[in-house]
């Protein structure tokens, strides 16, 4: 079996399980779980912010962050393929009362000036733009990395207009490994961030919201309102601390395996290896006899599990529980099916 559906399918390693078992805990709703506090402090410092808040999921972390920078009835701008709009069950509107408008689906290829031209100010009957959300790395963009210079230009545009900038940084660890940009340099660009511990880093659950002390104090209230206040959650935070200690730099191995898959499938015309920068391999099936659902089913019948993302796009994801033998098996099956 080769499971390439997502980097969320990883299971805690022996060392991570030991860290979980030995975690010192308290009651996080009362703010006295020492392991949670240690994780929040460490992540905030990594990204050069004042504070962070542990949340049970990336969706909750994103939606808390959006509510920190967009008032009810205000507008969020994001890409048409943004995770915060496509894969979070309409939470921005349903929970935050947030109106959204999108630019064309271009993945990690952003045009800061074009985004700035979309801004609307207060007054009249239009909805004022409060914030812009970007994704690093970009999920539906095939794990693409937004270049630092592009993010800096976007920050200049948003700052000049008084518009906040949020980063859905679920896989920002991969961007750091791919481009070598320091975490605090990324952090200095954004008003709020979310980062995920269970995508690539191998923790069983958990994300964090990052921002100013004032924002995170409000975030704690929003988390409780959304049902995210947990008690002896240090057993999960311990897994996050272990992941930060052991599983960031090794992401380069996942990137190398993803590139090997892409290079092996490139002759079939389904992927351009030069665009595979991190651990996501998108397969364009539009010129094959398969659609995404069909290829997913055919591969699963032979023990290779992938994900249908769009009608003609399937996705493969490498991760720390996937070894070279599993990659070889996946390549063998997919080459045979697609040939």
Image (cartoon, rainbow, N blue to C red):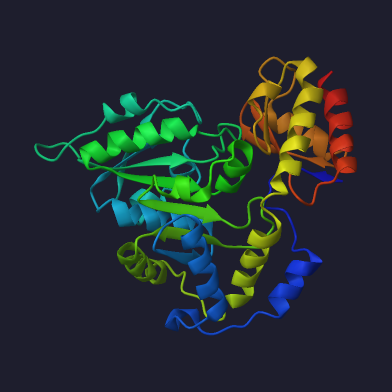
279 over 289 or under it: above or below: below
Q: Looking at the picture, how far across and down is residue 289, in whole percent?
A: 75, 18
Side of 292 where 325 appears, left or right? right
119 over 131 or under it: above or below: above
Q: Looking at the picture, how far across and down is residue 98, in whole percent?
A: 30, 48
The answer to which of 8 and 241 lies nearer the viewer is 241
- Determine which quarter of the picture holds residue 287: top right
* Residue at point 46%, 61% (across, down): 44
The answer to which of 231 and 37 lies nearer the viewer is 37
Q: How many marks overall?
A: 0
Q: Looking at the picture, how far across and down is residue 250, in whole percent?
A: 73, 49
Side of 189 where 126 appears, left or right? left
- Determine which quarter of the picture holds residue 118: top left
Q: Looking at the picture, how far across and down is residue 65, in whole percent?
A: 38, 55
Q: Quadrant of the C terminus?
A: top right
258 over 42 or under it: above or below: above
* Residue at point 38%, 37% (across, down): 78
- Determine which quarter of the picture holds residue 115: top left
Q: Residue furthest left?
A: 124
Side of 182 where 102 appears, left or right? left
Residue 203 in view: no
* Residue at point 23%, 49% (across, down): 73
285 over 80 or under it: above or below: above
Residue 308 in view: yes
């Amino acid at each position: 079996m080769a499971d390439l559906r997502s980097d969320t399918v990883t299971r805690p390693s022996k060392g991570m399980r030991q860290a979980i078992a030995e975690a010192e805990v308290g009651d996080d709703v009362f703010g006295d779980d020492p392991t949670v506090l240690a994780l929040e402090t460490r992540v905030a410092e990594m990204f050069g912010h004042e504070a962070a808040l542990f949340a049970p999921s990336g969706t909750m972390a994103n939606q808390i962050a959006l509510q920190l920078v967009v008032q009810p009835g205000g507008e969020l701008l994001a890409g048409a393929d943004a995770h915060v709009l496509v894969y979070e069950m309409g939470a921005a509107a349903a929970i935050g009362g947030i109106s959204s408008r999108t630019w064309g689906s271009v993945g990690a290829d952003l045009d800061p000036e074009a985004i700035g031209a979309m801004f609307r100010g207060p007054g009249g009957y239009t909805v004022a733009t409060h914030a812009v959300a970007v994704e690093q790395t970009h999920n539906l963009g095939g794990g693409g990395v937004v270049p630092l210079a592009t993010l800096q230009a976007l920050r200049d545009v948003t700052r000049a207009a008084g518009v906040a900038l949020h980063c859905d940084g679920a896989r920002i660890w991969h961007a750091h490994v791919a481009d070598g940009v320091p975490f605090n340099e990324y952090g200095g660009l954004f008003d709020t961030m979310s980062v995920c511990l269970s995508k690539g880093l191998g923790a069983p659950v958990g994300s964090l919201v990052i921002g100013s002390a004032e924002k995170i104090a409000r975030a704690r209230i929003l988390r409780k309102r959304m049902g995210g206040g947990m008690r002896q959650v240090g057993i999960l935070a311990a897994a996050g601390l272990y992941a930060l200690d052991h599983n960031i730099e090794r992401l380069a191995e996942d990137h190398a395996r993803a590139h090997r898959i892409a290079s092996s499938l490139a002759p079939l015309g389904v992927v351009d290896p030069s665009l595979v920068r991190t651990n996501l391999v998108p397969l364009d099936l539009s010129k094959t006899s398969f659609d995404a659902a069909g290829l997913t089913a055919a591969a699963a019948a032979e023990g290779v599990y992938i994900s249908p993302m769009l009608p003609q796009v399937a996705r493969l994801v490498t991760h720390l529980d996937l070894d070279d033998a599993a990659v070889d098996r996946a390549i063998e099956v997919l080459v045979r099916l697609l040939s």
